[in-house]
Image (cartoon, rainbow, N blue to C red):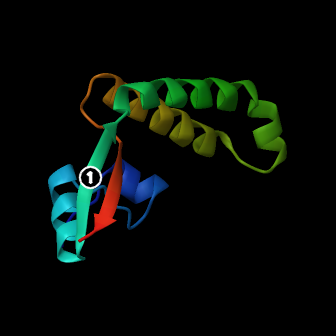
Amino acid sequence: MKSTDFIQQYIFPGGLLPSPGAFREAAAKAGLRVVGELDFGVDYAETLRRWRETFLSEEQRVRRLGFDTRFMRIWEFYLAYCEAAFATGNTSVMQFTLQRD
């Protein structure tokens, strides 16, 4: 059985981030051609930093909704982990513009 990483285990069960190459290949098999690409991973790191900052500043509100310390720690770790991965270029996010062949 294939193991899962932290994000697949706790944040997005069943989630998968395809590589840009795998995405392009799947698009081609579906009769689509990539006509534009935008990589904005470094900018997304800033988005994650802001989400983490806002999340932590709203701790009491989150707890009033019934979420506990474990939940808070998991999400703080997830947001910080991803922020670092995007900031260093270890992970990225892209927008593809597709056109039918």
Query: Where residue 22 sits in the image (x, y, percent)?
Result: 17, 60
Instruction: Say which quadrant the C terminus sits in.
Output: bottom left
Left or right: 38 in relation to 43: left
Instruction: Report the quarter where the N terminus lies.
Output: bottom left
Instruction: Specify whether 77 is left or right of 22.
Output: right
Q: Residue 21: name its quadrant.
A: bottom left
Label 1 SS: strand
The percent position of residue 93, horizontal first and vertical second, equals 35, 42
Residue type at mark 1: give it. Val
Q: Is residue 41 left or right of residue 11?
A: left
Q: Residue 99 at what x, y percent from top left?
A: 31, 63
Mark 1: few, some, or many residues within 10 Å (few <14, many ≥20)?
few
Q: Residue at x 74, y 32 (%)?
A: 59
Location of residue 32 by image quarter: bottom left
Vertical order, 101 against 17 (above or below):
below
- Which residue: 55% across, 40% down? 75
Percent of width and height locating residue 68 = 69, 45
Q: Which residue is found at the position 35% from the left and 53% from the top? A: 97
Q: Which residue is mark 1?
A: 35
For residue 84, above or below residue 16:
above
Decide: is 59 above or below 34: above
